[in-house]
Amino acid sequence: MKRISYTKYNGDLAGDMDLEDLMQQLSDYLLDSGFQDPLSRFQELQGEHTMDNLREALRQALELGDFNQEIRDRLDQMAAEGEIDKLIDQLMQRMEQQDYIRIDNPQDPSRPSSGPGDVGEGESHARFEVTDKSLDFLGYKTLQDLMGSLGRASAGRHDTSHQATGVETNGSIRPYEFGDTLNLDANATLAAAMISQAEELRDSNGGPITWPAQVWPIAVDYKHLHVQQSDYQSSCATVVMLDCSHSMILYGEDRFTPAKRVAMALSHLIRTQYPGDTLNCVLFHDSAEEVPVSQIARVKVGPHYTNTREGLRLARSILNRQRKEMRQIVMITDGKPSALTLPDGRIYKNAFGLDPLVLSETLEEVSRCRRAGILINTFMLASDPGLVQFVQRVSAMCRGKAYFTTPQTLGNYLMMDFMSRKMKTVH
């Protein structure tokens, strides 16, 4: 007789660890924006995505990360046995196999270079790239944290104050019009046909009619059709304008990484809950450029000046191509406009106060957005008097909202505004 013996499972720790939990422990390193935070455990890595830095980041995450007690006990045991390096190698292999990272093989220094120049020491180091799967997961986790702090469990589609014929009815009825969804209300349609037929018989007989003998069969005509109405749900086009000027990581505070996290969370929310919506991202600094939403997490801060007008111009151009009823710009910034792209392509810069030329041209672009029916909501990460004055004028011109917030509360403010705006039509 065949016997089966059972023993305690002693699987390897690398296979038992949840890679999603591990990715969350590494999120500060993977989303680094160039801010040198002396309190960050990944500060010495400087955000460089080399394999050596990833190894060190994993080591620090395993030593200081928040794991359940069973995992922590096994980690302490492996550390005592000197097996942590082996565990890190296995985790890196799993991360590559499950498409959380993509490893770029270094160029072999012994091989001749195919192009001009030599391969330096830094270029021979193996690097890795964070995959879209990882970025999507980090965006989802940020969204989960934000929605949890708002007390919301889920999000529906964009409700408005208008009504239309659709699948989910709200109890109201109206006569059918050409182009409506044929969501007929049988009772109202038959009642209208019977009343119309009875009135015609009464007029032809010149007196009372016998009900229902003379009204049967009921002749339903086009004019008798009635349809049930539902809450009209529209789509929205959003452009997130991220200020990536150097001030976003100055003054002892990282303002850019929280802004990136919020943009990633908003992207995940729109893709999963509002499939009819569109989201684009514009970075503005000395100039402005559009970047794919999938690349937001890889962006770092750039030049020193803030060309708000060029960012608004590019955002307006993007929204003008969108056939959506609601179009809005979400601008996240910490500085007043200090740069302007001149007609000949040169960039005029003045960081001292509100330059009259920069301000007038920027407000003219705001006026163009208003005439195009584009709403501008501004989230200010600083309380500089020049910035406050500028944002107040923008809000007054576009009837948008202005929020004085911090990197810690930015996500809450932005999500509350986005969710509440879905409850009404923006004109």
Image: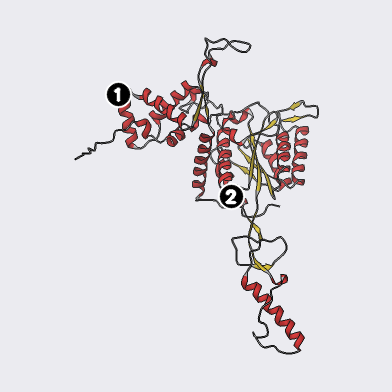
Left or right: residue 213 compared with residue 406: right
Left or right: residue 212 compared with residue 74: right
Residue placed furthest toward the left: 1
Q: Nearer the viewer, residue 340 or 222?
A: 222
Image coordinates of residue 151 in percent, x first then y, are 50, 50
Q: Nearer the viewer, residue 6 or 84?
A: 6
Left or right: residue 373 compared with residue 268: right
Image coordinates of residue 154 in percent, x first then y, are 52, 51
Residue 35, above or below 258: above
**Quadrant of the image containing the N terminus:** top left
Report the residue at 51% width, 20% height from top.
Answer: 105
Residue placed furthest toward the bottom: 207
Image coordinates of residue 247 in percent, x first then y, are 62, 29
Image coordinates of residue 60 in percent, x first then y, are 42, 27
Q: Earlier in the sequence, mark 2 or mark 1?
A: 1
Report the residue at 77% width, 25% height from top.
Answer: 346
Residue underneath mark 1? 81
Q: Nearer the viewer, residue 145 or 269?
A: 269
Spatial CA distance of label 2 from label 1 is: 51 Å
> In the rendered image, which quarter is residue 217 located in?
bottom right
